[in-house]
Image (cartoon, rainbow, N blue to C red):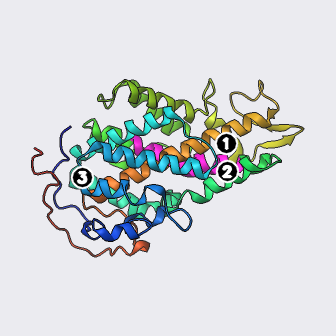
Amino acid sequence: MPGLSKIEEVVPFRSTARFMTDALGSLPIGEEMKWFSFGRSGLDFSREEWKRLMEEPGDLNNLTRLGIAVYQDCVKEAATDPEPELANAIEAMAHVVYHMTEEMDEDLWNDLVFFLQQRWRFDEQAFWESPETFMAANADVERSDRRNLLVELMLIEHGLLYRVRPAVFRLAWCMMISSGMKRGMGSIEENDPGQTLLVPKTFLEELVEERAPDFFDEKESAGMSALLRYLGLRETGSIADEVVRSISSRTFWMADGGVTMDLYLHAERDPPIEEERVAAWRESTVHLVACMSAFNVMLVGIATANDVDVRPERFGVKEDRKRKKQPSLNAASP
């Protein structure tokens, strides 16, 4: 596997040396990842997977292990079990993020920094929130003796619209960059001013169908196909966007044993929707949030390993830091 690309004059930089020391072992999580800590003890991956990536960012396996550890911790917090096919999707996403760095130039890194430091305030406030609250809420529903359809619907909407949707756009952007297509991140999200799930899913489908990027092996390709099925909430006809729109616009009403929803393609076929079906949608949403949280952490991790600090100002980042020229992470890389 080739080394990571040379990165020059990127704003802003931050040394990773201080958490590559023995002191890391006594911390619940590296400083750059405090935003993602769960409860009092931090995520299970906090000591090893993150440290390995910082020490050896040129090893794709380190990035993959980090992503899978995050996914497993998330679903565990939600009181459910991991899905092997989504672990394959995380492996594919790690491959994308890894090769993305080989194509990044100063403008693209600065674009990523802007979106994660500044744009989040307006477009995706959930990015810098730990998924713990969402996962714990799902665990409460899972362990309850009584179903609460309204709570389940709200969890589905929040998970898909505010956590999954922006991450899918970001994944599509990374896939384009890793394929050699230079395009600003904002130009992709501008194609969906109405905040739907259909547009980012379609972007992703087209990239997968066009084999962009073309380096996925058979297992990774199967993982991306599984991710797309989950983005359709694992139903023929990809019902997820209809579900999100119905919940967001409050065009649903409770019925005996279920809920009737104004679904723009499936409404006539499916009144009312049974509790078990809503529960299956929620479970798929949990796995999607966990999977895309893993992607977000891998993206932050690879940027941090490249001495690019993408954290917003509220984490102590100063906006007036000057540009520096950094050496290549891997002197042997071209």
Q: Circles 1 and 2: CB distance less than 8 Å?
A: yes
The disc label shown at residue 282, or none: 1
The disc label shown at residue 173, or none: none
Please, what secondary structure does the residue beneath circle 2 have? Answer: helix
Which quarter of the rendered picture does the N terminus lie within?
A: top left
Q: Is residue 303 magenta?
A: no
Q: Circles 3 and 2: CB distance less than 8 Å?
A: no
Instruction: Locate residue 236, reporting x and y percent.
Output: 62, 23
Q: Is 46 left, or right, of 125 in this rendering?
A: left
Instruction: Locate residue 148, reporting x and y percent.
Output: 80, 48
Q: Earlier in the sequence, mark 1 or mark 3?
A: 3
**Based on the displayed image, in which of its 4 quarters is residue 98 positioned?**
top left
Q: Nearer the viewer, mark 1 or mark 3?
A: 3
Question: Marks 1/2: CA distance?
Answer: 8 Å
Residue 110 shows in the view: no
Q: Main secondary structure of the magenta part?
A: helix
Q: Is residue 154 magenta?
A: yes
Disc 3: which residue: 56
Q: Nearer the viewer, residue 51 or 32?
A: 51
Q: Is residue 144 above or below residue 261?
A: below
Which residues are drawn in magenta?
A: 153-172
Disc 2: which residue: 138
Q: Nearer the viewer, mark 3 or mark 2?
A: 3
Amino acid on which the number 2 mark rests in the picture? Asn
Within 10 Å of the Cα at label 1, are there few (<14), some (14-19), or many (20+) other Cα atoms?
many
Instruction: Locate residue 316, reporting x and y percent.
Output: 38, 75
